[in-house]
Amino acid sequence: MDNDNQYLQMFFDESAEYLQQLNENVLLLEENPDDEEIINAVFRAAHSVKGMSATMGFELLTDLTHKIENILAKVRNKELDINEKIVDVLFAGLDEIKKLVDDIRENGQETTDISEYLAELDSLLTMEKDFESIKNEDDLDLKVSLTDDEFYQKLSLSDEEEEEILKRLKGNESFYNIKVNLKEDCLLKNVRGYMILKKAQELGFLAKSKPTQKEIEDEDFDLVIYIILISTLDKETIVNEIMDIVDVKDVTINQLDLKKSRTEVAASEEVKKQVKNDKSNEKDENMKTQDKNSKKLTNIQVSPTVRVDINKLDNLMNMVGELLINKTRLAGLNIDSEIYNDIIQQLDRVTTELHHNVMQIRMVPIGGIFNRFPRMVRDLSKELDKEINLVIEGAETELDRSIIDELADPLMHIIRNAIDHGIERPEKRKEMGKDPAGTILLQAYQKGSEIIIEAEDDGAGLDVEKITTKAIEKGIISEEEAEEMDKKDRLNLIFNPGFSTSNQVTDVSGRGVGMDVVKRVVESLDGQVFIESEKGVGTRFTISLPLTLAITQALMVKINQEIYAIPLGTISETLMITPEEILQVRGQDVIILRDKTIPLVEGAQKLNLNIEYGRFHKQEEIPVVIINSGEREIGLIVDDLLNQQEIVIKSLGNYLVNIKNISGATIVGDGDVALILDVRNIA
Amino acid sequence: MAKTVLVVDDAAFMRMMIKNILVDGGFEIVAEAENGKQAIDLYREHKPDLVTMDITMPGMDGLEAVKKIVEEDEEAKIIMCSAMGQQAMVIDAIQAGARDFVVKPFKPDRVLAAINKMFND
């Protein structure tokens, strides 16, 4: 059972990895349809999934991946051209694979019905073949022909042989040069070679081969076999038949016209080559332009990984937390001894290093979620008939793993919105004098102890008036309140639960996940989200997040004999004020700090403590912590400012998760529990 | 309907190996034989869609068995299970009518690829 689980886990992890690879590579393939390396990469990944599924005994998956592989094989053998339809089918296939894997994860069985998709694949496999064979021969010819020079060097017929063969021709046969490449890892290649010759003999008259049958049986050859074959069958059939032999890597075939004189043949080949060269030049140019495009996709790199259960890392982080707590306690003993001080210093250094390292281990590049988006952008822009370039920057920026996982959905929602509501249709963009193709810039970078993620589009921008009207209509704000609001506040209205500006619910963004969810998730990660938007110019969402959640620096304060922790990142400064400095604005206590009016709130009141409020008015000195949440700043009145220390953030557990203004708890030096203030809510 | 297979190999372990691979690949094992003679009898009895045939076996070897089976049933689909170094024997077997071969140690995907290719024909 344990073994089974282990295999299964590996299967899930690896198939997810392969799926990601497949998604990326199929996308690349669409842009670089002739890049064999990409085709091979796609093929290998599909093949690996198939192998794993087969080993695990998942029949549907095996069947599915097998058929997808068949399609890919055809692409690889140039029997199928990569076009939008094929790419769509491949993507659909990847989705089916994902569904099946999810099924297995959830209930151990492949429950999704993929028969419809399989039928589609089957029809594609057979239909495209017919289609391709009818499709202009010339084109095909260019693609499959090998340079005849190469062939003649390796294998050509003597005049006598040629005459002999010509005598045998009845008129309806064709004359073929065939080059068969075997795979590098081909086992018992002499047997394979033998099978190929045997197959050739079945297909027609094997005029000559290099290596000869004897050489093949003696294994006196490399991985290439040249054959001159006379057959009544068409190229397609011959190639397919030979490709059906295991370990055949590829087959190139060229039809010869023996009746023409040699010189004529040579001349026509010359022309052909010319055309080919022209074509390849063109291709080169294409490649160059495509390179630029593909660069922005390929620079999303996911580093090779050691797979560790995230729970183990959480445990490790917890242990480091415990260690930190005890170190703090130990340091608090204040023993007057040189050795003691020495040890404490060492301990401090080691624990800090350890903490830093564990944090590093938990960090993963944000590319892990960024690279899901190119596929999504492609699908959506197609669906909505828009042209969109997605530019990704800073995919290598690292974030705590637990944050990354949570972030995928909000980001996806923002980008969906940008595609659906933001970027206009090409015609409209042209009218407005914009580039018909919209751009979405997704970037991540580190700024101090925060990670900033920006999603920016050059679309229509948010309509502030419309948002305000809607918010009033929905009763989220009153008209009077609206009057008082500045642009920023009005934009922020879209974060209200149940708010949606689009009148049409589309398949894309009308899925019930609103911007409020985005805000909630980001805030639950101790982050913030801002919007900037200019009508007709575009919209930018900025998400700022802490580097890591588990351990942070905090200011310890005392409110009514209890110790509370305020995360340092949210504090802009601490002050000592006198009651005289407190002013009243519309019944609200405020102070003026460097020409800025900052509202004051009493900590005890915010925490709903059962004491008399407003006592601070009688104090000579009042400690105030200026905390900020986004653009808002408030002064939090506390009883005492204690010290700054590292705290290990612990959740309050499921039952207490909704306690207002408290975001968690930590253990302080003397072993007591201190609650952590939820500054976001208080401010 | 799963394709039926007759597995022929004198070593129980190898039979087990190939059985597991094939079952995982969606095949049904209808019989197992330890030598060529048994293989022929069981082939007659079960008419399997596929035979995996070891080459070296005590009594009647795989090559002989292939010849006999193909003689009786031209359509028989036989895959030879060969070790490295048995090239000549494999060529003989293919000449005798075996459709393909796999090489020990078996790699599941290679085995299945060979078999699936054969059924695709």
Image: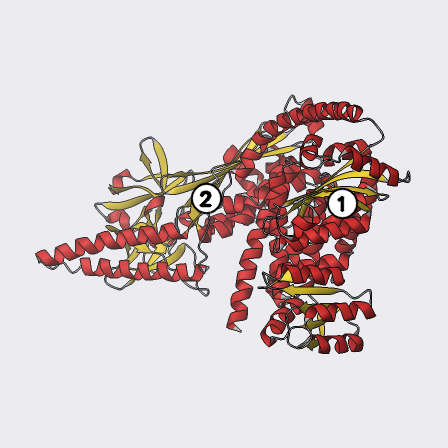
Query: Chain letter of disc 2?
Result: A
Residue that label 2 marks: A528
Say few, some or many: other residues with alpha carbon within 10 Å of mark 1 (under 14 / 14 to 19 / 20 or more).
Answer: many
Give, as a three-letter code, the residue at label 2: Gln
Evaluate whether residue A512 shows in this view. yes
- Asked whether A117 or A355 is in front, the reply is A117
Residue A377 seen by the camera: no
- Of all chains, the one bearing label 1 is A
Residue A251 is labelled as none
Relative image position of residue B1 (x, y in whole percent) = 78, 68
In the image shown, does A348 or A234 lie closer to the viewer?
A234
Q: CA distance from mark 2 to mark 1?
A: 60 Å
Kindly state the secondary structure of the residue where label 1 is placed: helix
> What residue is rendered at 72% in x and 59% in y?
B116
View extreme (top): residue = A433
Note whether A260 is above or below A620 in the view shown.
Answer: above
Q: Percent position (x, y) of residue A509?
A: 65, 44
Q: Which residue is mark 1?
A: A239
Q: Position of residue A205 (x, y in %)?
A: 81, 46
Mark 2 and mark 1 lie on one chain; the one further toward the N terminus is: 1
